[in-house]
Amino acid sequence: MRAVTVSEQMPLSSQEVFALLHNYERRLEWDTLLKKAELTRGHSEAGKGATSLCVGRPFFGLFGLETRYVTYREGEIAAVEMINKPPFFAEFAASIRHEDNELGSIATYKFRFTARPFFLRGLLEPLMLRALRAETAKRLEALSQFLSTEAREGGLGEARGEEDVGGDY
């Protein structure tokens, strides 16, 4: 099984980053890997036991990974495991941990996977590892940039659960 860890400095607190990251209604606003992201099997919000389907953009095969949240502690950590069998993945699991610091917070994404079919694993895993590591770094950087822009423009009220009171000041 291959494993990767990628971290990125975020401009906002762990709680704010966590809230946006697991808001599936806003996921495609910043996520560079996905063309579709939704909760599945009757779930309406992310949380332990909830399931989601994320479908990659063309380079990543247009197939979907359906996952179940196995850990969900708001503002701290969320972890998922794959529950379907898409092409090329025998196993997949990931976690994202958030830790506050003086600049906002650090988001650390860890994932592990096993490629299939077995007889192509030696060929597929190094290629998949390289592509997934690069895309994960790109996604976290895009999230950080999106959060910076939203914070400057005051657009994070929805992620924070705040109402827009309007008005020019």
Image (tube, grey):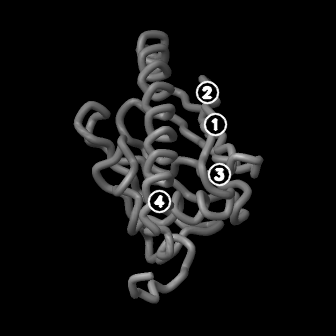
x, y percentage for residue 140? 51, 41
Q: Is residue 41 left or right of residue 50?
A: left
Instruction: Name the quadrant of the C terminus.
Output: bottom left
Q: Secondary structure at mark 2?
A: strand
Furthest residue toward top: 123
Does label 2 or label 1 sit earlier along the sequence?
A: 2
Does label 3 or label 4 sit earlier along the sequence?
A: 3
Using the rendered view, name the quadrant where residue 168 is placed: bottom left
Depth order, front residue of 159/116 = 159
Quickly name the residue at label 4: 152
Furthest residue toward left: 58
Quickly name the residue at label 2: 4
The correct choice, above or below, for 71 with respect to 57 in the image is below
Q: Is residue 86 left or right of residue 81?
A: left
Q: Are marks 4 and 1 in contact (CB under 8 Å)?
A: no
Q: Are marks 2 and 1 in contact (CB under 8 Å)?
A: yes
Quickly name the residue at label 1: 110
